[in-house]
Image: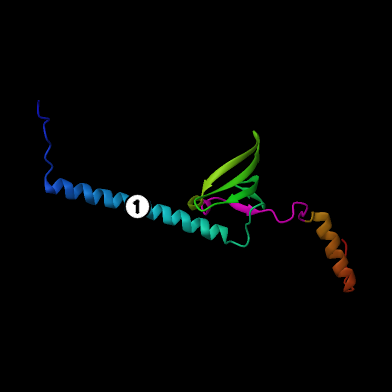
């Protein structure tokens, strides 16, 4: 029977491989813990809850789930209603706005003028017209 060739790895290479694997595992753990903490932070944010209507990067959306590693947003877009899966460590870099009252609108110039006129009239102030 023929012997298979053996490969000898010096102690230096074994140590180097061990250090490299240790660094890779530490980086993976760091990313996993960071994502978990971001998810925990987003989950405990009293301003955003599952089911809230939001604007995600300017698009109307709804928070479907807030997970430990990623959150799911239902987005209304040109292609219909889709789910967007976003890692929790990316949420802080997104523009996320909560829709508080979709029927609330800023006053028009005419409404502001009428409001100002009512305030002035209630104080007995009259404006001179040219």
Residue under the point 87% across and 74% down? 123
Q: Which residue is mark 1?
A: 27
Nearest to the observer: residue 128 or residue 8? 8
Q: Quadrant of residue 80?
A: top right
Q: Is residue 50 left or right of residue 1?
A: right
Tell me if I can see residue 127 in this picture: no
Q: Is 10 inside the magenta-drawn segment? A: no
Q: Specify the farthest residue to the bottom.
A: 123
Crowd around label 1: few <14 · some 14–19 · many ≥20 (10 Å) = few
Query: Residue 72 location, x and y as percent?
Result: 58, 46
The quadrant of the picture occupied by the C terminus is bottom right
Q: Residue at x 57, y 58 (%)?
A: 43
Q: Residue lying farthest top?
A: 1
**Residue 105 magenta:** yes
Q: Report the residue at 86% width, 69% height from top.
A: 120
Classify mark 1: helix, strand or loop.
helix
In this view, the residue in front, 77 or 74, is: 74
Q: Quadrant of residue 109?
A: bottom right
Residue 27 percent across, percent down from the top left:
34, 52
Image point (53%, 60%), residue name:
41
Q: Nearer the viewer, residue 127 or 67?
A: 67
* Left or right: residue 93 compared with residue 52: left
Q: Give x and y (percent) for residue 16.
A: 19, 48
6 vs 109: above or below: above
**Magenta residues, start to end:** 91-106
Q: Quadrant of the N terminus?
A: top left
Q: Please provide percent x and percent y for residue 92.
A: 52, 54
Asked if one can make out residue 20 in the rendered structure from this viewpoint, the answer is: yes
Count of number-bearing discs: 1
Task: Indicate left or right for 71 with 55 as reference.
Answer: left
């Amino acid at each position: 029977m023929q012997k298979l060739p053996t490969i000898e790895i010096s102690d230096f290479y074994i140590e180097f491989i061990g250090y490299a694997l240790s660094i890779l595992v530490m980086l993976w753990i760091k990313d996993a813990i960071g994502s978990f903490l971001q998810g925990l932070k987003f989950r405990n944010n009293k301003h955003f809850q599952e089911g809230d209507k939001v604007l995600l990067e300017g698009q109307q959306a709804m928070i479907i789930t807030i997970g430990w590693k990623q959150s799911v947003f239902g987005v209304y877009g040109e292609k219909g209603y889709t789910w967007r899966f976003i890692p929790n460590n990316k949420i802080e870099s997104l523009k996320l706005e909560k829709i508080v009252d979709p029927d609330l609108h800023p006053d028009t110039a005419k409404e502001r003028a009428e409001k100002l006129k009512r305030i002035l009239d209630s104080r007995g102030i009259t404006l001179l017209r040219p």
